[in-house]
Image (cartoon, rainbow, N blue to C red):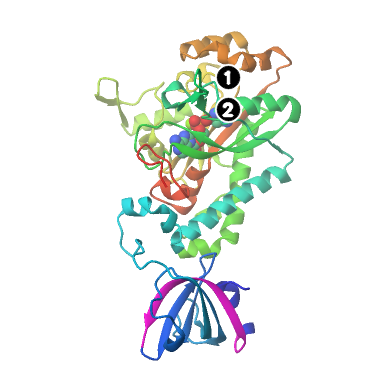
Amino acid sequence: MLRADALKSADYIGKSVTIRGWVYRLRKQKENTFLIVRDDRGGVIQSVLPTSIVPANLTIESSVQITGVLNRDKRAPEGGYEIRGNNIKIFNIADSDYPIGEFQSVDLLLDNRHLALRARKMVAIAKIRASVLKLARNWFIMNDWMEITAPIIVKGAVEGGATLFKINYFGNDYAYLSQSAQLYLEAMVFSLGRVWSMTPSFRAESSRTVRHLSEFTHLEAEAPWVELEDVLKVQEELISEIIKNIIVERQAEFALLKRDISTLDKIKPPFERISYEKAIDYLRSIDFTVLDKDGRNRKIELGDDLNIDSERELTKEALQPKFIVGYPLKVKPFYIKEDPQNVGYGLAVDMLAPDGFGEITSGGMREDNNQVLTTRMQKEGLDINNYQWYLDLRRYGSVPHGGFGLGIERLIRWIIRIDDIKDAVLFPRTMSRVSP
Ligand code: 4AD
Ligand code: MG
């Protein structure tokens, strides 16, 4: 059975066709009933049925199958095709109190996310999301990277203790939900070479922002015998390839979302690289201020981390994503390798999306000296016992290696220009929401 978009073709005019789906719009008149069907990929087509064969209690979101003759009618919405129906089969008459109408509060839509996802805009986003996942996987397959899966239940923090979700582990033990698969990816470069993974990562983010989720889809990659520049190249090639293909593959969805893709069309490697120090110089030149520990505003200075506001300043006029290279070690986690040419600074890189969408990836080279690692872990207050296996990786045949992590929802948020990251995931998890 064809879906709506496939049916809308000159080939089927005058022929008998059948469509299956849900009642999207319903307008009953004395003689005829106009019924728009939404199929199981969000496509819609109008049908006209004799009111006499339409059940009197038919409601929006009832599931139906309609058979009739395809007709071209300029007045028909969504492409000018219409099914002159002569048969309607009902699977289920929906309750008449469907909670989702045209103008609903954000909270009501989130409470009813399981239903709200049927909206055509949400279907379009879900399709773009599916394509991002597929294109990312394709890129790694084409470039000979091995996919691995890492455990979600772990004993060690990767990205600091503040955002860990602690879970009870069989009564007398504890564990955490993974913040990042990185340490496991590092373990696998010794046996599989270039590896990547796409796993949920968890952050107990206590701040409500439009770019943080407590559960997100984390694409991470790690490779042996690379230098920092290689880590940048992988990222810009991966992201450019995803975008190049998605604007073709999902043209209709971008159009439905009214997203102009002409800026995405220009995304091509190489992306601009600027040093962290240059970034701070620039921010100082425009008198950019940050809130210091005492709650006072002061001019940004070397050593400060970048935040969403400084990231926005740095990418305001950018047409492409931008790499910021060489952050101070103290704003990066324990595993980042110190730059031998620049003491106190790390071989670390973030990619910032244009137009204030901010950080979408973080990565870098990994520290391989166990003494340095141990000292840094202690500084972060980590329990070394949980990292003995990680330190083993440096004891037995360590090699220079590096990688990065990309937040899939951050990427989707930027390419579709979604205000709130919650709309880049189907069932968002945040501080105030774990259901549906
Ligand atoms: O910058 P992060 O914390 O880096 C890591 O986890 C590294 N261990 C990755 C690695 O090198 N293998 O997270 C990586 C990316 C961020 O740049 C961001 O895109 C996304 O993950 N991310 C989040 N996305 C949504 N909600 C959150 N709370 C996120 N935290 C990080
Ligand atoms: Mg980061």
> Closer to the camera, 157 or 299?
157
Instruction: Provide residue 415's location: percent of width, then percent of height.
Output: 49, 51
Badge 2: few (under 14), some or many (20 or more) residues near its Cα, within 10 Å? many
Residue 366 placement (x, y as % from top left) = 60, 22
What residue sits 67% from the left and 14% below the top?
Answer: 392
Return the x and y of residue 27 as percentages of the image width and height.
37, 80
The stretch drawn in magenta includes residue 19: yes
Which kind of residue does numbered mark 2 sit on?
Gly
> Mark 2–mark 1 contact, CB under 8 Å?
yes
Q: Quadrant of residue 310?
A: top left
Circle 2 SS class: strand
Mark 2 close to ligand 1, CB under 8 Å: yes
Query: Can you name the residue that lies furthest to the bottom here?
Result: 31
Of callouts 2 and 1, the N-terminal one: 1
Three-letter residue code for mark 1: Lys
Q: Secondary structure at mark 1?
A: loop
Vertical relation: 240 (above or below) 90: above
Mark 1 crowd level (few <14, some 14–19, many ≥20, 10 Å Cα): many
Closer-to-camera residue (318/355): 355
The quadrant of the picture occupied by the N terminus is bottom right
Asked whether residue 324 appears in the rendered view, the answer is no
Residue 332 in percent (x, y) is at 48, 23
Task: Name the dominant secondary structure of the magenta segment.
Answer: strand
Rendered residue at 36%/23% (across/down): 301
Residue 126 lies, with reference to residue 361, above or below; the image says below
Question: Distance between the Cα atoms at labels 2 and 1?
Answer: 8 Å
Residue 337 seen in the figure: yes
| Pointer 1 residue Cβ closer than 8 Å to ligand 1 | no
Which residue bears the numbered disc 2?
364
* Residue 200 is covered by the magenta coloring: no
Stretch of the chain drawn in magenta: 13-29
Q: Residue tagged by mark 1?
A: 337
